[in-house]
Image (spheres, coloured by chain):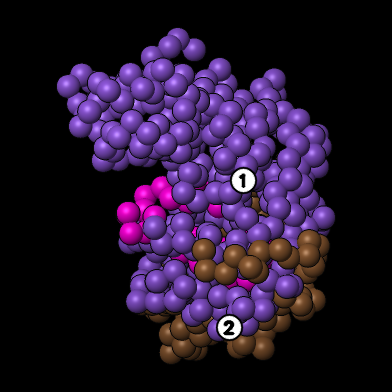
Amino acid sequence: MSAPAAVSAPAGVRAVPEPPARFLDLVAAEWIKMRSLRSTPWVLVLVPFFVTGCAALDALWDYNNFPRYSPEAQREHMFALRDAFPVSGYWTLILVAAGMGAVAVVGEYGTGLIRTTMVAVPARASVVLAKAVLVALVWTAVGAVAAAGSFTASQLILGLRDAALPVTDPVAVRSLAASALLAPVCALIGLALGVLIRHGATTAVVAAFTLLMLPFFVSDRRRWSAEIYNAMVGPAWQRLTTDWTPPPGSGSYPGTVPGSWLAYLAWPVLLVTAALIMIRRRDV
Amino acid sequence: MAGPGAADRIGGVIEVNGLTKRYGRKTAVDDLCFTVRPGQVTGFLGPNGAGKTTTLRMILGLDAPTGGTATVGGVPFRDHPRGLRHAGALLDAQQVHGGLTARAHLAALSRSNRLPARRVDEVLAEVGLTEAARRRVGGFSLGMKQRLGIAAALLGDPPVLMFDEPINGMDPEGVLWVRHLFRRLAAQGRTVFLSSHLMSEMENTADQLVVIGRGRLIAAESVRSFAARGSRLRVVVRTPRTAELTEVLTRAGGRVEPDDGPGTDRLAVTGLPAERIGTLALDHRIVLHELTTRSASLEEAFMEITADTVEYLAGQPR
């Protein structure tokens, strides 16, 4: 004991004067954690490359087969939009974005870091909200790069056949926006499921099932189930990135554009709200 | 670390009142009441499964109590929007993300509480991890993780510090360092609350004890008085004239036994304090080579007092 004389301290005196709590500091703290993980830069760079690559490959296929297409197909070049936003690339994007969103929380639950975090910041809901803001920002950026990349690469290739879409095309603009926002929507769903489920592997399975598998189980051939189908994120993205819908009376019930945007909004908002409520109520 | 002026602005009493936690039909913590005061090291003792960690979690607002209250500096901990300036805690050294570097881990915590950036380097130096700052925590030994956890607890220079089993996994040098650190933090006027299931850890570190068993309070008093409640005081004497000394001490009312079995020059005496034994030996001109009061009685006191509260006894059907 070096200084026993200093022992008697008046109780109840506050320690260091405390600056008011700022939400942005929490976002910055989450960013420090996210960028420090070795996998983060790899994933963030590889995802747009992969999506762009998928689009380029699809466009190359149509480029090669173009001479064999009917004159009508050559003129309409409906495949231009489909090549720009290939299901293979964007389904992968959904999976990775949801997974990485989940990792932002289940990584903390799995290691127990969450307790250290919550002792440092007892305002738990603020922590979850900060994570949500960061994940949304980062994945909007990744999604925007991926969408711009896949659109540009595919249209450059198809442009060689005069079969490209101009970026000013209204459906192209809508498709670009929907594809860029697909990543943050899925990342937020993953994050919220992570808060609700807390267990890493279970969260990954539930997120992948909800986003990728569930649409297969719901038919779009009956009105009521088609409503459910259209309200899912994957089908909503597909509706937003196409300008062709089956004519009425053909036995299928395609979703509407506003309805698809609503699905984009509703999933993350409802799930993140549930996460914010649960994080306050449960023991950490 | 806090400067010399820290003491006069520090104060933070932990107050636990009727604290209860039930999980279904099992009661983990049962109507606990105790106070932990600044300026001293308070040990939180109990056998494994006694409810120590649950209690610490409730104090820190991680778990909601089923009943009762716990306050830190007069306020339930969850009422603070940011915690590091009010209390620092190390609950489990493994609770860090292995993929983060030590520096990133501390920088994120520091940033979340808007602490000055220099605090990260200060606490890294304080715990001796400056060299390892850029290494990923996943490669740390348990002892290094303990040091990192202590660094995190010290970040906000808080008046209250709580550590759950802080000595686990530390090498002997680390144990000495951490004991010294706890004493110093208490001397600065902070409230230092450490849990352990090992009595011997507390002997050299704590001033006060809070002892629980099966979630109930068993004792809340100074280490000295707790030890005195257990076994009688025991003094070890070494002398070349064991037979004579045995006779003298027995006549004076002591109970004498050979300490290491028969044929030794070492005697264990109960019922007489060391001073009395020394005086008696002098009166009878018996040379003493050693006269030691056995502090192991603290361990015994703990075992005795908590014997019927041990949750999982080895070798017994549950």
* Residue A200 point in image, percent of width and height: 51, 48
Q: What residue sits right under mark 2 in the picture?
A: B117
For label 2, the SS is loop
The chain to which mark 2 is attached is B
- Asked if residue A215 shows in the view, the reply is no
Look at 63% across and 82% down and name the residue there.
B116
Q: What stretch is highlighted in magenta?
A: B148-175
- Height in image: B4 above or below B145? below
Q: Is residue B220 visible?
A: yes
Residue B208 image label: 1
Type of the residue with mark 1: Gln
Residue B165, image x, y percentages: 49, 46
Element type where label 1 sits in the image:
strand
Determine whether B186 is above or below B214 in the image. below
Residue at horizontal 43 percent and vertical 12 percent from the top = B316
How many residues crowd mark 1 within 10 Å: few (<14), some (14–19), many (20+)? Answer: many
In the rendered structure, which disc, 2 or 1, sits on the residue that comes first in sequence?
2
Tell me the colour chain A is drawn in. Answer: brown
Residue at 76% across, 42% down: B16
Percent across and percent down for residue B154 are 57, 67
Palette colour of chain B = purple
Q: In this view, does A253 lie to the left or right of B273?
A: right
